[in-house]
DNA sequence: GCGATCAGCT
DNA sequence: CACAGCTGATCGC
């Protein structure tokens, strides 16, 4: 659940509302629906995202136009020019779902990392610039001023298996049930493609996906079309988790019984079942790592598959990054549950961090006494979701640790919307005066912005007289003019919005000028000595590089005003470049061994039925010879 | 009628 | 409390 950025930041991340539309730059971390809610009525140029995220979003919302997006890939940096000062944004893999990234912003506002939704694995952290990572218990050379952190499971103590391990558990579950004639996989979320790919690869079979339920796996068709089949005789079926999964599972099992068939397998890779109180309590009391699939009373096999970090992973990441300030991007003030945040607050170093006050639009004034007592801050959900009905402003109260006196004054003066320290930035930026506010920010104590990555492009945003012209391509350094009745635009919705912007902004619209400054291959360094991880890292680099190459010249993106740019081949080529040929028996054993080695797990025993078959073949041979 | 928003469900 | 996403009800234009 994304949150609005504080008024001191010139950009929005994953929010599409009238207030975030007033920001000058818009970033999209990934294409899950809860991060694109409102994008159709409240989009605004430019939207920065990866090529893959853009492609999925355009598929979901055909009303949007390709030219709204500026593609930026993992490992790349952009220098974005802004009236308040240029800032650099660098993109890192968020290990959440295909196309999902974290954004690191470095500029006059300080150094801000927005994780989007993420699984902050060691590998994920290693990709961040070295200066922001503390090593061997030491603090990093350069501290992040602020992290917007995905605290979805910040209250969940249970360790999550790695995604590799989760997929292995699924494969093992199937392996252990050779008699199951059908295997139903509830995997139609963006982010579960790896499961289907690995299952398909391991068992040498494509996965049946019902054409009538196409809406559920549209993104999958874009990312891994090769592993799907329309042939219902496949042993593997994609199953929709909705509606009433328990009932569906029971029906499938009962049908098999009626027809004297072996039980089918219904496998649900998800974290949801494990985080339910009754289940999580059992796991916590057992102090066991979730290492295999579990069957519930409905006959559904659950595998813990998480696209978000556990509390443990978050604590570990914060220890490494040692940020000055943490804001949860998830509701419920969950950053407050993190030990790092609690320690930080009790350390009461808040007054020294004037930069943060400015970001949140709070003047740093004379009285800087610290009130060492614990205070209660009203944490009304009405600010978080102003459009929600039936909300009780008094419903939530959180404990906050020592807080500066001026903060107390501000909170009690009540002319500002409630703000939860460290819990959640929830600032209704209703008065858009922030853009015109003359606030001079001190330069950060940190070193000057440095560009990291493959491509450094410069983007300058300025107000340009808006003429609609029929130009279908834009060269870099060209100013973009719009003229007349926008007949060259293939998409009516965009055109409508251009008109809307013209009206509301008095014929002015911010236009970007993009200039590619340089290209180099300085991808972020890797310092881990673990060879396996390093190899994996290299593979994902190759993938990233391929994607990056596809978007090398940022101006290309702007040249695609007309016609759709959703290029299935290109995307398929990227994601499947390392895919083994499905269904091929040639060199199967080797590939299996490689697959399992790559997952760092023992190679499983062959299927009992296969062993039986091999034995019988040997018997036949023997009988033939003698 | 259409689109936005929300509750409910898994 | 608790993924992400779908469906259907409701509201407002």
Image: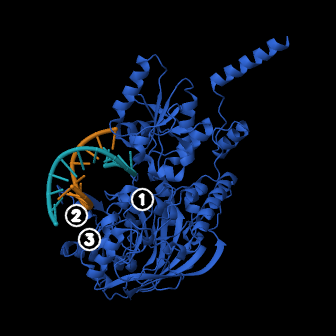
Chain colours: A blue, B orange, C cyan
Q: Are marks 1 and 2 in contact (CB under 8 Å)?
A: no
Q: Which residue does the image show at 70% across and 41% down from the upper left?
A: A591
Mark closer to the observer (1, 2): 2
At x 56% / y 44%, what residue is drawn? A227
Q: CA distance from mark 1 to mark 3?
A: 20 Å
Classify residue B10 as left or right of residue A310: left
Q: Do callouts 2 and 3 mark residues in contact (Cβ within 8 Å)? A: yes
Classify residue A206 by image quadrant.
top right
Name the residue that disc number 2 marks.
A386
Based on the displayed image, in which of its 4 quarters is residue A174 positioned?
top right
| SS at badge 3 | loop
Residue A274 shows in this picture: no
Element at badge 2? loop
Above or below, comparing residue A557 to residue A503 in the picture: above
- Residue A405 x/y as whole percent: 27, 75
Residue A345: which numbered mark, if any? none
Q: Where is residue A341? Give x, y as percent.
A: 40, 62
Badge 1 sits on which subunit? A
Disc 1, SS: loop
Question: Mark 3, chain letter?
Answer: A
Left of A282 or right of it: where is A394? left
- Residue receiving disc 1: A150
Within-10-Å neighbours for mark 2: few <14, some 14–19, many 20+: few
Q: Sequence order check: which comes first, mark 1 or mark 2?
A: 1
Whether residue A85 is visible here, answered yes or no, is yes
Q: Which mark is residue A428?
A: 3
Q: Is residue A141 above or below residue A577?
A: below
Q: Position of residue A242 (x, y in %)?
A: 35, 40
A403 or A102: nearer the viewer: A102
**Neighbour tally class for label 3: few under 14, some 14-19, many 20 plus, Cα within 10 Å:** many
């Amino acid at each position: 659940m994304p949150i609005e950025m504080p008024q001191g930041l010139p950009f929005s991340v994953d929010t599409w509302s009238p207030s975030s539309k007033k920001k000058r730059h818009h970033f999209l971390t990934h294409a899950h629906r809860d991060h694109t809610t409102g994008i159709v009525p409240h989009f605004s140029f430019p939207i920065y995202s990866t090529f893959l995220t853009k492609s999925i979003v355009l598929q979901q919302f055909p009303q949007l136009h390709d030219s709204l997006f500026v593609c930026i890939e993992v490992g790349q940096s952009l220098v974005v020019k802004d009236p308040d000062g240029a800032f650099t944004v660098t993109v890192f893999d968020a290990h959440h779902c295909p196309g999902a990234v974290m954004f690191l912003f470095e500029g006059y506002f300080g150094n801000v990392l927005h994780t989007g939704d993420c699984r902050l694995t060691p590998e994920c952290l290693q990709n961040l610039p070295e200066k922001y990572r503390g090593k061997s218990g030491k603090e990093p050379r350069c501290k992040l001023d602020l992290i917007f952190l995905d605290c979805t499971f910040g209250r969940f103590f249970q360790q999550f298996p790695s995604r590799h391990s989760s997929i292995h558990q699924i494969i093992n579950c199937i392996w252990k049930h050779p008699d199951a004639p059908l295997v139903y996989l509830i995997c139609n979320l963006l982010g579960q493609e790896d499961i289907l790919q690995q299952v398909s690869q391991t068992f040498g079979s494509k996965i049946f996906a019902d054409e009538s339920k196409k809406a559920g796996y549209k993104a999958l068709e874009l990312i891994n079309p090769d592993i799907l089949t329309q042939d219902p005789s496949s042993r593997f079926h994609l199953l929709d988790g909705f509606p009433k999964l328990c009932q569906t599972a029971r029906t499938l099992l009962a049908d098999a019984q009626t027809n004297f068939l072996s039980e089918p397998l219904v496998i649900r890779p998800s974290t949801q079942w494990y985080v339910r109180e009754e289940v999580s309590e059992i796991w916590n009391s057992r102090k066991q790592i979730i290492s295999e699939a579990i069957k519930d009373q409905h006959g559904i096999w659950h595998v813990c598959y998480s696209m978000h970090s556990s509390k443990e992973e978050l604590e570990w990441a914060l220890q490494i990054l040692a940020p000055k300030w943490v804001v949860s991007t998830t509701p419920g003030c969950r950053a407050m549950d993190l030990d790092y945040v609690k320690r930080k607050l009790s350390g009461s170093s808040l007054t020294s961090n004037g930069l943060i006050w400015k970001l949140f639009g709070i003047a740093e004034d004379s009285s800087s006494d610290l009130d060492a007592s614990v205070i209660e801050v009203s944490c009304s959900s009405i600010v978080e979701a102003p459009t929600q009905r039936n909300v009780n402003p008094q419903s939530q109260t959180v404990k906050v640790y020592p807080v500066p006196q001026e903060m107390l004054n501000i909170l009690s003066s009540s002319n500002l919307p409630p703000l939860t320290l460290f819990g959640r930035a929830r600032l209704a930026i209703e008065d858009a005066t922030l853009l015109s506010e003359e606030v001079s920010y001190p330069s950060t104590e940190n070193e000057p912005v440095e560009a990291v990555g493959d491509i450094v492009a410069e983007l300058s945003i300025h107000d340009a007289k808006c003429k609609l012209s029929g130009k279908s391509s834009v060269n870099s350094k060209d100013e973009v003019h719009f003229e007349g009745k926008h007949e060259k635009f293939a998409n009516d919705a965009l055109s409508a919005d251009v008109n809307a912007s013209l009206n509301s902004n008095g014929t002015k619209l911010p236009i970007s000028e993009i200039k590619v400054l340089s290209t180099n291959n300085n991808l972020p360094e890797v310092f881990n000595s673990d060879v396996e991880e390093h190899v994996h890292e290299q593979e994902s680099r190759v993938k990233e590089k391929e994607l990056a190459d596809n978007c090398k010249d940022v101006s290309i993106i702007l040249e695609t005003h007309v016609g759709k740019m959703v290029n299935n081949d290109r995307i398929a080529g990227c994601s499947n470049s390392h895919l083994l040929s499905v269904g091929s028996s040639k060199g199967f054993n080797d590939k299996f061994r490689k697959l399992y080695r790559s997952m760092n797990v023992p190679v499983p025993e062959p299927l009992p039925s296969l062993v039986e078959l091999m034995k019988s073949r040997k018997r036949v041979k023997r009988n033939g010879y003698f």
